[in-house]
Image (cartoon, grey):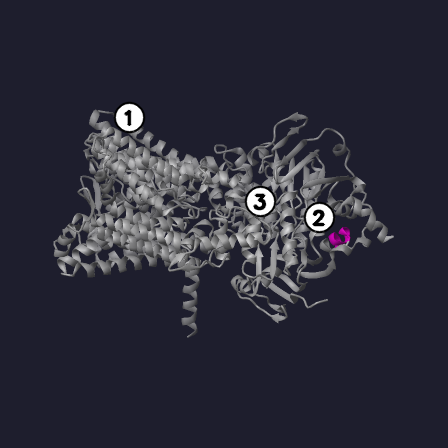
C-alpha cells in the first residue's frame, strides 16, 4: 500500500507542478489558453509549449534510458551541434540533396558519437560523466571545424518541414515527439529491453549474475541517446534555418537531465518513466513560456530552473525529508 | 636519485612530456614561437582559465566536480563592471564583495552536497544555471569599465628584464598557483582533500573532518571563480554576462590533462599549471599558423583528454591488479 | 590472574527485528591474543562495534583498564587506546605510507606541514615491528600484508593499548600471515592486548592464547586455546555437542540408481584461482544432490562462483556429458549450459530490489531468450503465478516490488527465477540462511522434489544437519581447499566436523571421548 503510493508519487509531483503552473495562468492570464486556427493549423501558447519543448522532449526520451542504467550523457547538446553542422554542410555543398540522404548521413554521425560514448562506458568502464564529458569538450570544436567557424544558413524546403511544418493541423515537431514516444514504448517497454535496462540500473551485479548482457544494454542506450540527440539537432536546425556550432544545443543536456529527473526517474538508475520525462520537459517549457508571457526576460529563465532542480533533488533526499517531517511533527505537537 | 619514475608521477610526467613535445613542434614549425614573450603570453592569455582550473583541481581531487565555475566568472565580471560603472563603487569594494559572494555561493553548494548527500554534478549544474541567470539579472549587456584604478593597473607590470614584463593578470595567476600549491601540499586541509577523494569511507574512519573539508573545497572553488571573473575584467576592461560560457569544460579538461584523476585522490596542482600551458600552447600554435581553425583547440584538448582518461584507467586498473 | 585490560559483561544490543547480542561477555588480558569465534550472525562484529563506539550497547558494562567506558564514536574509542584494523584495509590507497600513518595527526610549523617529521615518524612506527620499507611510496604499491601492517602501525601509533584485528588475514598468503603474526607477537610482548577475528582455524591455533565463542548473540564460553580440541571448538561454534552426534547418517539416504551410475553431467578438473581457491575436482550427475560443507570463508561460495563463471578459473577444464566445453567465462554462458546459481548474498547479488516479483522471476529466463524473443506479458503472469503458487511465495500481488517481501519470500522468488529457466544443475548457496523455519522446511522439501525430477542440486550450507539430511555426496572444504569427500552412509555431522577440524586430530578427540 505504502509502496503503490510511493511509485505513483513520482508522477504526481511533476503533474502537480504542471497543474499549478497552468492554474496560475488560468487565473491571471486566461488568454494563455486560447488557441487559434490559421491556415488550418493550430496556434497558441499551449501549442507553442509543445513545439518549443519538442527538442527537450526528444532529448529527454533518449536521456531517460541512459539515466535508467545509472549513467548520464553530457554530450547530447554537442551532438546536436555536430548534426546541425553536418546537415548544414551537406546542403551547402549540394542544395538539392534528398532529405533522406541528409538525414541518413547526419543521424549516422550522431549514432557513431553515441556508440563511442557507449563503448567508453560499457567496455572501457569509464564513469559515464567522464566518458561523455570528452565529447562534450570536443564536440563544439568539431562542429565549428565542420562549418569552418561560421554560422551557415540552412534553407531547404524539405528539410525545413522538420522544424516548421505542420501535420494534421499540429506542428510536425510535436507529431514527431508523439511518434518517437510511440516508437520507444513499442521498442523498449513492450520488449525485454526495458526489463534489462531497469535490472541493470537497479542492481547491476544481480542482473549480470542472472545472465543480463549489461554491457550490450549500456552500449545500446548511449547509441539511442546519441541518435535522438542527432534528431533533436536536426529539428532545431530546421526550425531556425541556421546552424550555429557555438550556440546550437548549448546547455540542452542539462534541460534533458532536468526533465528526466523531474519526471520521476532517479539519477541512480532503475525504474524509468518515459511519460514522466515528457511531463518533465513540458513542465520546464511551461515554466519558460509562462515567464515569457509575463515579460520576464528569457535570459533570466535559468534561475527558476536552478531553483526547480535543487528543490526536486532536496525532495528526493532522505535527510531533507526527515528534517522536514520532524519540523512538521514538532509544529503539530505545539 | 634513481631515474625510475614512481607510478604516482607517471601522469604528471606524461603531461610534462606532452607540453615539451607540443612546444617543441610549434617552435620548429613557427618562427618566433620559441621566445620568452610567447611563454609570458601563455600565462596572461589564460590567467582566468588557470585560476578557475586551480580551484577545480581541489574539487576534483576531493572526488567532486564543479560545473558552476564558468557562470560564476560571468556573474562576477558583470557584477564588478556594473557596480563600478552604474553604482560608482570603488573597484576594491566591488572586488571584495564579489569574492565574498563567490565564496559563499560555493560553500552553499558544498553544504547541499554534503548535508543532503546530493550528487555534486547536479547541485553545481543548478549553480551553473543560477549564476548565469543572476549575471543577466545584474546586467543584460556587455559593459566597459572606465576607472582610474583600472587605467593604472593596466601598466602595473612586473618587469622581467630584456624588455619583457609580466602583466598583472599573469602575476595573479602565478600567485593563485602558489597559494593552491601551498594548500594542496602543506596544509592539513589540503591533505584531507586527497584523503577524501582517495577513499571517503576510510577518511571518515580515520576521523578526518570530511564535511568541513568538502564544503571548504567548493567554497575555495567559488572564491577562485570569482577571482577569475575579476581577472577577466582586468583583462578585457569590461564585464559581460556571457563571459565564461562553457569555461567549466576547459577547466575540467586542463585539470585532467594535468594528470589529476577525475575519480579523485590523485593529482598535482603543478599538473594543472602544465595543463593550462598545454592549452595555451595549442591555442598559440593555431594562432601562429593562421590557416588552422581556432576550434581545433578544443578538439585537440578533447583528444588529449580522451588519451589521458584511458591512460589513467590503465594505470589504476594495473594498480588494482598489483 | 592480573586485572583484565578489558572486561565486557552482559552486553546486549538489538536492531529492528533482531536481537544481535544478548548478554555477551568478553575478557581480555594485557599481552594476549584473544580469538573471537563464531559463524555468521553470531554477533562478533556487533560486539566489536559496541566496543569501538560504532554502535551503542543497550545493556551491559564495559571496563577498560578497570574504568567503565562508553565511547560514542570510533574516534573517542581511539582516544581511550582502543584501535581497530578492518578486513578491508582502511587506508587511502594513493597516498604514501608515511602520510597514511599520520593523516589527521600531522604537525605544522609556521603553517607548513613537516614532511620530514611525517616520514621519520612512519619509519619509527614501522620499525617497532621490524618492517623496513620506503615510506614515501604509495600504500597501494605494496602487498595487502604490508598494507595491513601499515594500518596496524597507524592504529598503534597513538599509544593504543588494545588492538582489534577484524579478519586481517582473509586475503593474505601463508608467508604474509607469518609476517603479520610476528608483528602481533611483538605487540603482545610490549603489553598490548589483541582481539583477533578470523575464520581460519589453523591461525587460531597458531597465534591465540584464548578463545571466546559466540553463537546467536550469546557467549558460549571462554577457553584456553591449548586445551580446546578443534572438534570441540567447531561443535561450540555450530552448537552441536560432540558426544550427542551419531556416527552415521540419520536416515539411510543413499544415492539413487541413476545418480550413482552413468556419466557425470558436469565435470570440472583442476579448477583453481590464485588467492581464491586451490585446485579442486568436481563432478555431479543428474538427479544427484551434492553438498559443499565448511566454515564461513572456507571457499564454498568461491567454488560455486568458479563453476558458474562469475570468477574465472586460472587452470583446469570443464566437460559436460564427457565433452570438453571450456570453463564458463560468464554467468550468461553458464546459464546457457542450463546451470542456475542462487547467491547467498540475496541483497547484493540476488534481488533487483525495486522491480516486481514477476520481473524478478522472469529475469533470468528472459535474459537467456535475449532481446528479440519476448516473453509475452500473459506468459510472464502465468510463470510468475505458477511459481508463486508452487513455492507458496507470500506476496500481496505479483506486481509488488520484491524488496518489500520478507527474506524467506525473497529467497523463494529467487529460487523461482532459476527454476523458471528449467536448469539441469542448480547451485544453492545458503538457501535457508536468515529465513524462518516454515520457509526453510518448504525449501528443503522443494530441493528433494527437484532432485526427484532429475535436476542436479549443489547445496552449500553451514547447517551440517541440512547437508546430512539432503545430500548424497559431500565435499568438505577448509581454508580454501577441498579436504575430503564423503558419500552415502559416510555422511554424518561428526564426519564432516572432523574433516573440517583436521582428520589427524579426530583420533585424539575420539580417545578423549572413550
| Residue at image mark 2 | C202
Marks 2 and 3 on same chain: yes
| Residue at image mark 1 | A101
Q: Chain of mark 1?
A: A
For residue C385, the mark is 3
Q: Residue B111, located in which quarter of the rendered image?
A: bottom left
Query: Judging from the image, what secondary structure is the residue with disc 2 in?
Result: helix
User: How many numbered discs?
Assistant: 3
Residue A188, given in percent of the width and then of the height, sits at 43, 38
Query: Judging from the image, what secondary structure is the residue with disc 1 in?
Result: helix
CA gap between label 1 and label 2 equals 73 Å
Query: Judging from the image, what secondary structure is the residue with disc 3 in?
Result: helix
- B313 w.r.t. B141: above or below: above
CA gap between label 2 and label 3 equals 49 Å
Which comes sooner in the sequence, label 2 or label 3?
2
Residue C133, given in percent of the width and then of the height, sits at 54, 46
Q: Is the residue marked by circle 1 packed among few (<14), some (14-19), or many (20+) residues within 10 Å?
A: few
Q: Residue at x 20, y 36 (%)?
A: A242
CA gap between label 1 and label 3 equals 50 Å
Closer to the observer: label 2 or label 3? 2
Q: Which residues are magenta?
A: C229-235
Q: Is the residue marked by circle 2 packed among few (<14), some (14-19), or many (20+) residues within 10 Å?
A: some
Farthest-out residue, bottom = A334
- C106 w.r.t. C278: above or below: below
Amino acid at each position: 500500500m505504502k509502496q503503490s503510493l510511493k511509485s505513483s508519487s513520482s508522477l504526481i509531483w511533476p503533474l502537480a507542478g504542471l497543474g499549478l503552473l497552468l492554474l496560475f495562468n488560468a487565473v491571471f492570464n486566461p488568454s494563455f489558453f486560447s488557441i487559434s486556427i490559421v491556415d488550418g493549423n493550430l496556434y497558441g501558447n499551449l501549442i507553442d509549449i509543445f513545439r518549443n519543448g519538442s527538442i527537450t522532449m526528444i532529448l529527454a526520451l533518449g536521456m531517460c534510458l541512459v539515466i535508467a542504467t545509472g549513467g548520464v550523457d553530457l554530450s547530447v547538446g554537442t551532438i546536436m551541434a555536430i548534426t546541425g553542422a553536418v546537415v548544414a554542410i551537406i546542403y551547402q555543398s549540394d542544395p538539392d540533396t534528398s532529405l533522406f540522404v541528409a538525414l541518413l548521413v547526419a543521424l549516422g554521425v550522431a549514432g557513431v558519437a553515441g556508440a563511442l560514448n557507449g563503448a567508453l562506458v560499457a567496455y572501457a568502464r569509464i564513469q559515464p560523466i567522464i566518458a561523455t564529458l570528452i565529447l562534450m569538450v570536443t564536440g563544439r570544436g568539431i562542429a565549428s571545424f565542420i562549418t569552418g567557424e561560421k554560422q551557415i544558413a540552412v534553407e531547404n524546403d524539405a528539410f525545413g518541414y522538420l522544424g516548421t511544418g505542420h501535420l494534421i493541423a499540429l506542428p510536425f515537431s510535436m507529431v514527431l515527439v508523439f511518434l518517437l514516444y510511440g516508437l520507444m514504448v513499442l521498442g523498449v517497454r513492450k520488449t525485454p529491453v526495458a526489463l534489462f535496462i531497469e535490472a541493470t540500473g537497479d542492481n547491476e551485479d544481480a542482473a549480470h549474475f542472472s545472465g543480463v548482457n549489461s554491457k550490450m544494454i549500456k552500449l545500446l542506450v548511449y547509441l539511442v541517446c546519441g541518435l535522438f540527440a542527432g534528431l533533436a539537432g536536426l529539428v532545431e536546425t530546421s526550425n531556425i534555418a541556421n546552424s550555429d556550432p557555438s550556440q546550437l544545443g548549448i546547455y540542452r543536456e542539462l534541460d534533458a537531465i532536468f526533465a528526466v529527473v523531474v519526471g520521476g526517474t532517479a539519477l541512480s538508475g532503475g525504474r524509468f518513466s518515459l511519460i514522466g520525462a515528457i511531463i518533465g520537459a513540458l513542465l520546464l517549457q511551461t515554466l519558460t513560456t509562462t515567464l515569457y508571457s509575463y515579460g520576464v526576460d528569457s535570459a533570466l529563465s535559468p534561475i527558476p530552473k536552478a531553483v526547480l532542480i535543487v528543490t526536486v533533488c532536496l525532495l528526493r533526499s532522505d535527510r531533507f525529508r526527515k528534517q522536514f517531517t520532524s519540523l512538521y511533527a514538532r509544529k503539530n505537537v505545539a | 636519485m634513481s631515474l625510475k619514475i614512481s607510478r604516482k608521477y607517471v601522469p604528471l610526467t606524461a603531461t610534462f612530456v606532452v607540453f615539451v613535445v607540443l612546444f617543441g613542434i610549434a617552435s620548429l614549425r613557427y618562427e618566433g614561437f620559441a621566445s620568452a614573450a610567447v611563454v609570458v603570453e601563455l600565462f596572461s592569455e589564460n590567467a582566468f582559465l588557470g585560476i578557475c582550473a586551480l580551484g577545480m583541481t581541489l574539487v576534483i581531487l576531493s572526488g567532486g566536480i564543479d560545473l558552476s565555475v564558468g557562470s560564476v566568472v560571468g556573474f562576477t565580471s558583470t557584477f564588478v563592471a556594473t557596480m563600478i560603472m552604474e553604482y560608482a563603487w570603488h573597484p576594491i569594494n566591488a572586488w571584495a564583495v564579489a569574492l565574498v559572494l563567490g565564496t559563499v555561493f560555493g560553500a552553499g553548494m558544498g553544504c547541499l552536497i554534503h548535508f543532503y548527500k546530493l550528487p555534486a554534478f547536479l547541485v553545481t549544474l543548478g549553480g551553473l544555471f543560477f549564476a548565469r541567470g543572476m549575471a543577466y539579472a545584474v546586467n543584460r549587456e556587455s559593459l566597459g569599465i572606465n576607472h582610474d584604478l583600472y587605467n593604472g593597473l593596466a601598466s602595473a607590470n612586473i618587469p622581467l628584464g630584456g624588455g619583457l614584463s609580466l602583466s598583472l593578470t599573469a602575476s595573479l595567476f602565478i600567485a593563485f598557483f602558489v597559494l593552491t600549491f601551498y594548500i594542496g601540499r602543506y596544509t592539513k586541509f589540503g591533505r584531507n582533500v586527497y584523503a577524501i577523494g582517495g577513499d571517503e569511507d576510510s577518511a571518515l574512519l580515520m576521523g578526518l573532518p570530511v564535511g568541513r573539508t568538502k564544503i571548504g573545497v567548493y567554497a575555495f572553488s567559488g572564491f577562485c571563480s570569482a577571482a577569475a571573473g575579476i581577472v577577466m575584467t582586468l583583462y578585457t576592461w569590461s564585464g559581460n554576462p556571457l563571459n565564461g560560457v562553457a569555461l567549466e569544460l576547459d577547466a575540467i579538461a586542463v585539470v585532467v590533462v594535468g594528470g589529476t584523476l577525475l575519480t579523485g585522490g590523485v593529482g598535482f596542482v603543478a599538473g594543472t599549471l602544465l595543463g593550462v600551458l598545454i592549452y595555451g600552447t595549442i591555442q598559440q600554435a593555431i594562432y601562429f599558423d593562421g590557416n588552422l581553425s581556432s576550434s581545433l583547440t578544443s578538439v585537440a584538448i578533447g583528444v588529449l583528454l580522451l588519451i589521458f582518461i584511458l591512460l589513467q584507467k590503465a594505470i589504476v586498473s594495473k594498480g588494482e591488479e598489483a | 590472574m592480573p586485572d583484565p585490560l578489558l572486561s565486557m559483561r552482559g552486553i546486549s544490543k538489538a536492531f529492528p527485528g533482531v536481537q544481535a547480542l544478548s548478554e555477551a561477555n568478553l575478557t581480555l588480558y594485557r599481552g594476549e591474543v584473544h580469538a573471537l569465534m563464531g559463524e555468521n550472525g553470531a554477533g562478533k562484529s556487533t560486539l566489536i562495534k559496541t566496543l569501538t563506539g560504532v554502535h551503542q550497547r543497550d545493556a551491559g558494562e564495559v571496563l577498560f583498564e578497570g574504568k567503565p567506558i562508553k565511547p560514542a564514536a570510533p574516534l573517542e574509542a581511539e582516544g581511550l587506546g582502543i584501535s581497530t584494523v578492518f578486513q578491508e584495509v582502511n587506508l587511502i590507497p594513493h597516498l604514501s605510507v608515511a602520510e597514511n600513518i599520520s593523516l589527521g595527526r600531522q604537525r605544522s610549523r609556521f603553517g607548513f606541514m613537516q614532511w620530514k617529521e611525517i616520514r621519520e615518524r612512519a619509519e619509527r612506527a614501522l620499525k617497532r615491528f621490524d618492517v623496513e620499507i620506503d615510506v614515501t611510496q604509495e600504500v597501494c604499491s605494496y602487498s595487502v600484508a604490508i598494507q595491513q601492517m601499515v594500518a596496524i602501525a597507524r592504529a598503534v601509533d597513538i599509544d593504543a593499548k588494545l588492538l582489534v584485528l577484524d579478519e586481517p588475514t582473509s586475503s593474505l598468503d601463508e608467508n604474509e600471515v607469518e609476517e603479520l603474526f610476528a608483528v602481533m607477537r611483538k605487540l603482545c610482548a610490549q603489553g598490548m592486548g589483541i582481539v583477533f577475528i578470523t575464520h581460519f582455524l589453523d591461525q587460531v591455533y597458531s597465534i591465540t592464547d584464548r578463545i571466546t565463542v559466540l553463537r546467536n548473540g550469546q557467549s558460549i564460553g571462554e577457553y584456553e586455546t591449548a586445551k580446546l580440541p578443534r572438534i570441540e571448538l567447531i561443535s561450540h561454534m555450530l552448537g552441536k555437542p560432540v558426544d550427542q552426534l551419531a556416527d552415521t547418517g540419520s536416515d539411510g539416504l543413499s544415492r539413487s540408481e541413476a545418480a550413482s551410475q552413468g556419466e557425470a553431467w558436469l565435470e570440472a578438473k583442476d579448477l583453481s584461482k590464485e588467492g581464491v581457491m586451490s585446485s579442486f575436482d568436481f563432478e555431479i550427475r543428474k538427479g544427484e544432490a551434492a553438498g559443499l560443507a565448511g566454515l564461513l570463508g572456507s571457499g564454498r561460495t568461491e567454488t560455486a562462483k568458479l563453476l558458474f563463471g562469475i570468477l574465472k578459473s586460472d587452470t583446469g577444464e570443464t566437460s559436460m556429458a564427457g565433452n570438453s566445453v571450456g570453463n564458463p567465462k560468464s554467468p550468461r554462458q553458464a546459464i546457457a549450459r542450463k546451470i542456475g546459481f542462487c547467491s547467498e548474498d540475496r541483497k547484493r547479488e540476488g534481488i533487483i530490489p525495486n522491480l516486481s516479483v514477476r520481473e524478478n522471476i522472469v529475469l533470468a529466463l528472459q535474459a537467456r531468450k535475449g532481446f528479440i524473443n519476448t516473453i509475452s506479458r500473459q506468459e510472464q503472469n502465468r510463470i510468475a503465478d505458477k511459481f508463486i503458487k508452487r513455492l507458496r511465495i507470500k506476496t500481496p500481488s505479483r506486481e509488488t516490488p520484491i524488496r518489500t517481501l520478507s527474506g524467506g519470500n525473497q529467497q523463494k522468488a529467487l529460487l523461482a527465477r532459476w527454476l523458471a529457466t528449467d536448469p539441469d544443475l542448480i547451485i544453492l548457496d545458503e538457501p535457508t540462511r536468515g529465513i524462518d523455519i516454515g520457509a526453510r522446511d518448504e525449501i528443503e522439501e522443494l530441493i528433494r522434489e527437484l532432485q526427484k525430477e532429475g535436476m542436479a542440486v549443489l547445496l552449500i550450507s553451514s547447517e551440517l544437519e541440512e547437508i546430512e539430511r539432503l545430500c548424497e555426496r559431500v565435499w568438505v572444504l577448509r581454508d580454501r581447499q577441498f579436504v575430503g569427500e564423503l558419500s552415502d552412509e559416510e555422511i554424518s555431522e561428526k564426519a564432516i566436523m572432523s574433516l573440517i577440524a583436521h582428520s589427524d586430530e579426530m583420533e585424539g578427540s575420539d580417545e578423549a571421548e572413550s
